[in-house]
Amino acid sequence: MLFAYLLVVGPRRKDWVENKSFPSKNFTYWLLGLVSLYLAIASPIDHIGEKYLFWVHMVQHIILIFISPIFFLLAIPQWMAERLFAKNSKLEKITHPFFAALIFNTIFIFWHIPYFYELALVNKMVHDLEHLTFVIGALIMWWPIIRPVKSWQKQPGSSLLLYLFVIVTFQIPLFVLLTFSPDLWYPFYGEASRLEGWLDISAIEDQALGGLIMKTIAGFAYFVAFVYVWLKWAKD
């Protein structure tokens, strides 16, 4: 990602585009995306979530879904989005709200099925694939809201509000089950070594906390998106 960024803003930029600026605001978004991605996959968050605590793993997923992808989409200047994506009809189709909701919710639910979730915990290649699909799925999900390519057909505000409602509705059962289930969904964490101090909680408490964190932060993110779409719709 850093190489791609340097390619489009560095000394070779003139080879593919002339007289186009890369605003400092977009540069800041790009750096924030990189920093948040680093925190998710290269900080202790990754090790603790993978080996010990479910709720820390959920924090990692929150960053990969609700933070990094948004920054990366906001980092794309409009001229670059038009140059790179405007003629890509396949991308335009899969980022349509119907397909975007289907793709993201499928990815999100799939990786929380106990068998596949635990497979990712014990197999690094599968774990990396999980993270990659989360980021790609989230980029697709947030695309209709952020609209990097302005020349594509604009979706009505009512359609985008329905889009967000559908995404949330399909995720609520998972959040509720994780938060309130008396059974341990992921036995891996029941067998994991418990950490000392404030991180020392039971596996069931860990699962409930993870569900609560996901439900709260995801709900806040979707609420902000809902308000943003509503205000844009009212303005139009």
Image (tube, rainbow, N blue to C red):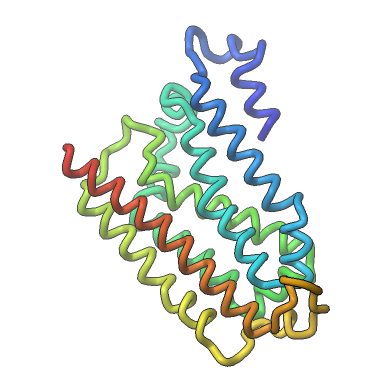
Looking at the image, which residue sits at the far front? Answer: 197
Residue at the location (71% across, 68% down)? 120
- Residue 35 in the image, given as x and y percentages of width and height: 66, 40
Left or right of residue 100, residue 63 in this image: right
The quarter of the image holding the N terminus is top right
Residue at the location (49% across, 30% down)? 76
Left or right of residue 28, residue 145 in this image: left
- The vertical placement of 187 against 224, above or below, is below
Looking at the image, which residue sits at the far bottom? Answer: 182
| Residue nearest the observer in this picture, 133 or 186 | 186
Left or right of residue 18, residue 170 in this image: left
| Residue nearest the observer in this picture, 67 or 81 | 67
- The vertical placement of 152 against 110, above or below, is above
Residue at the location (31% across, 53% down)? 226
The quarter of the picture where residue 196 lies is: bottom right
- Residue 208 in the image, given as x and y percentages of width and height: 57, 79
Left or right of residue 206, residue 217 in this image: left
The quarter of the image holding the C terminus is top left
> Exactly how many numbered labels are in the figure?
0
- The vertical placement of 203 against 135, above or below, is below
Residue at the location (74% across, 80% down)? 188
- The vertical placement of 116 against 42, above or below, is below
- Residue 6 in the image, given as x and y percentages of width and height: 66, 22
| Residue nearest the observer in this picture, 145 or 42 | 42
- Residue 63 in the image, given as x and y percentages of width and height: 58, 53
